[in-house]
Image: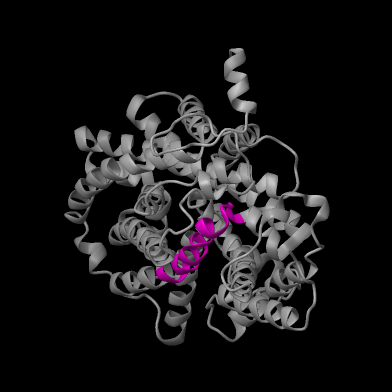
Amino acid sequence: MTGAGVGALTADGMPTHEGDLSVEGHGFEPIPADKRYGSVGRVFTVFFSPNLVPAAFFIGTLVAADFLKIGFLTGVIAIIIGNLVGSIVVGAMAGMGPSTGMAQMPLARLAYGKSVILPGLLNWISCIGWDGINSIFGAAALTLLTGLPFLVSLLILVVLQGGLSILGYEAIHTFEKYMAIVLGVVFAAVTVVVLGKSASGMARVDGLEGLDNLGAVVTYIAIVASFALAWALYASDYTRYLPVNASRSRIFWLTTLSLTIACGWLEILGLAVADQATDTSVDTINNLLGGGLIGGIAMVAIAIGTIAINAMNDYTGSLSLQAAGVNVKRVYSAIVVAVLGFLFTIYLNQGGFASKFENYLLFLAYWIAPWSAVLLVDWRLRGGKADVTGLTNFAKLPSGILGLASLLIGFIVSLPFQASSVGFELMDAGLPVNTISVNQLHGADLGFEVGFVVAALIYWLGSRMGAGKTA
């Protein structure tokens, strides 16, 4: 790399207009009001493109699992509800970007103070995990298309997504804007072909009865919601450059609709062919399309979708590590996330992917729910505005013990209401995990809702009593 190239990586440059593809060296610090730009409409595409991925399709196919056995119509209703529940939270947080000029995890310093170390590192790990999950699909698609070894395909994707995340905010927005058109057209064609072969899947009926069926539906809603809710950790990362006067209501609805439409589209597609999904999502899509030209185009779309979503994982992961107090340049942190995501993909590819994927999704919902509740209550108590100038100096942050305690208590109280397979192992070991879900709720997973409500109440009451005051 030339000296000029190294200088671009270490500089604190910021994009100045739409289409500015210079390296964004700027980190988590607030974007000054006079440096803001961009149209609100791009909020839709930045959350639309990265969710047209096989991971969403895979969630749809889960309805055929023995612990769910959900019919087509029931599954469609569950998918709509789950996506709305998760997306509404993301939409509410996306509006914080123009108000503060800050990314989501750095902004969490308002409520968590120095305690942001825990959620910051958790999100950094989560971004690495999502890199691995998405890359499984993308590398498999590229291998099917080209015949290259899996590791070579994976390396190509990691280099491309890492490069996009290094360029940063504007490059990601620009890429997602144009890929929304490309991926939308391709998956529209895929949908026509796949639905033509889904008669049996669309005739699928519920396999459980009564309260057992209700419990399965509630659990499926939790799985669907967790996929959308994971974007709460990213929300204001991609709105922080918008002008201060950007419409909050438009940001909310564009975010909510974008996630619900994109995730729901691929999930319902997977739901329609769940009985035929005997292999990975990529192989299932390729087999249903019969290979050929349209199959090849679909594989290209899957590879592009992987770059689209993983570039955002790398970018957000880099900001989360900075938010946790780690003194590292954003671009270098993004490179680290990409490399670790590469290694995690290799681990996931060793086998047992379906089980690992389900457990990871539910885990995300369990801790993100109380984390989100604390941020939303804190934001509400501040009247939807805050002075963020003091958030950049980690040493001067308050402890944030109330926020951390609310998160941890919300998570712990939710344990008996969870229904993850990891929880069943802990339950067998004598720990109070999954117990209420299994013994009283017919397997229904309410961990998401319980964790959110408990954390919100504790933080609200504690704040009203003046405990743990933050910046």
Q: Residue at x 51, y 43 (%)?
A: 35
- Answer left or right for 405 relative to 442: right
| On screen, residue 160 above or below 449 | above
Q: Is residue 350 visible?
A: no
Q: Residue at x 47, y 26 (%)?
A: 156
| On screen, residue 87 above or below 299 | below
Residue farthest along the front direction in this orientation: 34
Image quadrant assignment for residue 268: bottom left
Is-magenta flag for residue 383? no
Q: Residue at x 60, y 70 (%)?
A: 379
Q: Residue at x 33, y 29 (%)?
A: 145
Image quadrant assignment for residue 110: bottom right
Point out residue 31 in the picture as x, y percentages from the top left corner. Answer: 57, 47
Q: Is residue 223 visible?
A: yes
- Answer left or right for 389 relative to 312: right
Give the colour scheme shown: one colour
Numbered marks: total = 0
Q: Nearer the viewer, residue 442 or 53?
A: 53
Point out residue 415 in the picture as x, y percentages from the top left corner. Answer: 67, 73
Give the quarter of the figure containing the N terminus: top right
User: What secondary structure do most residues of the magenta stretch adopt?
Assistant: helix
Image quadrant assignment for residue 367: bottom right
Region of the chain picked out in magenta, as a range = 84-104
Point out residue 61 in the picture as x, y percentages from the top left corner. Answer: 38, 58
Q: Nearer the viewer, residue 208 or 359?
A: 359
Point out residue 137 in the picture as x, y percentages from the top left corner. Answer: 43, 41
Give the quarter of the figure containing the C terminus: bottom right
- Answer left or right for 348 relative to 88: right
Is-magenta flag for residue 99? yes
